[in-house]
Amino acid sequence: MAYHKQRYERLTFSFMDVEQQQEAFARPAKYFYDTRGSQLYEQICTLPEYYPYRAERDILASYAPDIYAAMGHLPLVEFGSGSAAKTCYLLTMYEHAGQPFLYCPVDISRAALETSAQQLLAAYSHLSIHAIHADFAGNPGVIRALHLEKKAMAFFGSNLGNLTRAESRDFLQSTAALMGPEDVFLLGVDLKKSTTLLLPAYDDAQGVTAAFNLNLLHRMNRELGANFHVPGFTHLALYNQEHGRIEMHLRSRQAQHVAITKTAQTIHFAAGETIHTENSYKYSLADIRALGHCTGLTLSHTWFDRQHYFLLGLFHREN
Ligand code: AVI
């Protein structure tokens, strides 16, 4: 893979060539996250119904010393780092150790990488950053550019949940292939639970998740020259028991035609027909252990929030 590099004091940036970035997934979650979609997702994370963000943050806030001790003082690579708000709990442990440390955020948003790098370098005097601007989703191997001998890798936010079971296996398998015997992988996973908790988390009273879902239609109108009449669709969230996943759909209120200029298509929707926009898979502890096992990873440590809504699991490579 070809990378461009820029170096500053304590900060290195690597940019992966855009044409080498893969479009590996059938329903890539990334299309939700244009500027408006990213703002709406930030808002979702503050909603009373959306427990996953708070639950994972609470685990990090409560157990950061234990997690850091189990990981060791290894360079920390984070997939989908965003604002790195939760990662700070771990970075603070590294800083308190009083030794130099390296943080390698990987993100699709260059703006998020630049902003967070500036803030982190100002906050932590022992920190150096090597940021990678890349679409890592289908390809965790983008981090080979870092040439790290040993490393800890982290994937927070239950982002694994937006991949199908097969894609999750591929992601973990590719991650395991990057790991040496002393490397570790810290994974945040949303646990299976009652639908009385799950459904409101994806269909909140203020309608923020609905706006996040409907934003896809605004985006298609803008970027693909589509003519979706957005009020002609409603947000639908359901739990698919068989697959163990929340599904988000957009349901057509009436029979209608939509033209998409860029793809030269006209699509007919029957009344009540839905566009399936997102999956958010939920896992049990046994599912996660099994997923690790079939991808060559052993789950060596687990941490839960007080309500057992969410799990942070630490994996080692199986020998
Ligand atoms: C980013 N991802 C883990 C969120 C989730 O819970 O699946 C995306 C989301 N979709 C609706 N609300 C939040």
Image (cartoon, rainbow, N blue to C red):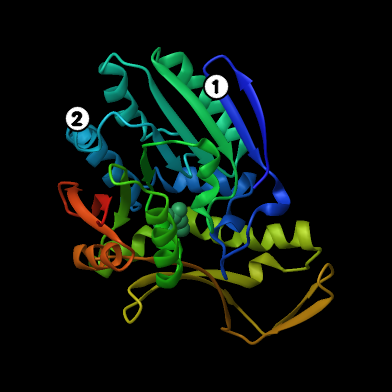
Residue 198, percent from left and from top:
31, 63
Q: Is residue 196 above or below residue 111?
A: below
The kind of residue on which mark 2 rests is Pro
Q: Nearer the viewer, mark 1 or mark 2?
A: 1
Q: Can you see residue 205?
A: no
Q: Residues within 10 Å of mark 1 (few under 14, many from 20)?
A: some
| Residue at (28% x, 13% y) in the render | 98
* Quarter of the figure with residue 35: top right
Q: Quadrant of ligand 1?
A: bottom left
In front: 312, or 210? Answer: 312
| Residue at (50% x, 48% y) in the render | 41
Q: Secondary structure at mark 1?
A: strand
Q: Secondary structure at mark 2?
A: helix
Identify the residue position indicated by label 2 in the image. 65
Lower sequence index among marks 1 and 2: 1
| Residue at (79% x, 80% y) in the render | 266
